[in-house]
Amino acid sequence: MHPDIHGNQAQSLAEATVAPGARTRWHRHLTSEEIYHFLRGRGTLQIDTGRLKVKPGDTALIPGGCWHRVINTGAENLVFLCCCSPAYAHADTERRPARGGGAG
């Protein structure tokens, strides 16, 4: 759900899936804070230098400006909801360059 499509005004909601053994790229949102709510699977949420093991039912806050990524450490898809306020915007998202030719 996003203001550009649905008419809501102050937030967005998306579902994300990370395959077993995969990870999202390091990124941050300059102004938006995010709430991740985990529905299926197991993994690790990294926020700046901290790590949090996650499983179904877990919820985490990612403050604006914090680098973060999700790593699927389990055998099934890791599925979670991402709620951004203010709503997600590509212009508000910065991706950390990959280091040493790796996957970030």
Image (cartoon, grey):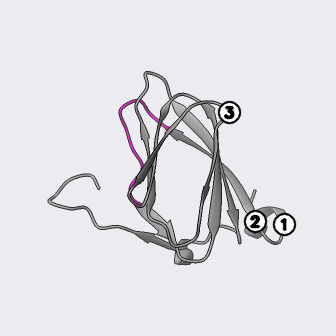
Of label 2 and label 3, which has the lower sequence position?
2
Name the spot of residue 31 as percent of width and height, x first. 60, 77
Q: Give, as a three-letter code, the residue at label 3.
A: Gly
Query: In the image, is residue 66 part of the stretch drawn in magenta?
Result: no
Residue bearing the label numbered 3: 57
Residue bearing the label numbered 1: 8
Residue bearing the label numbered 2: 11
Tell me the quarter of the image containing the C terminus. bottom left
| Magenta residues, dominant SS class | loop
Residue 42 or residue 8, whichever sits in front: 42
Q: Which residues are magenta?
A: 18-26
**Label 2, residues with CA under 10 Å away: few <14, some 14-19, many ≥20:** some
| Kind of element beneath mark 3 | loop
Of label 1 and label 3, which has the lower sequence position?
1
As drawn, is 32 to the left or to the right of 13? left
How far apart are labels 1 and 2 at the CA level?
7 Å
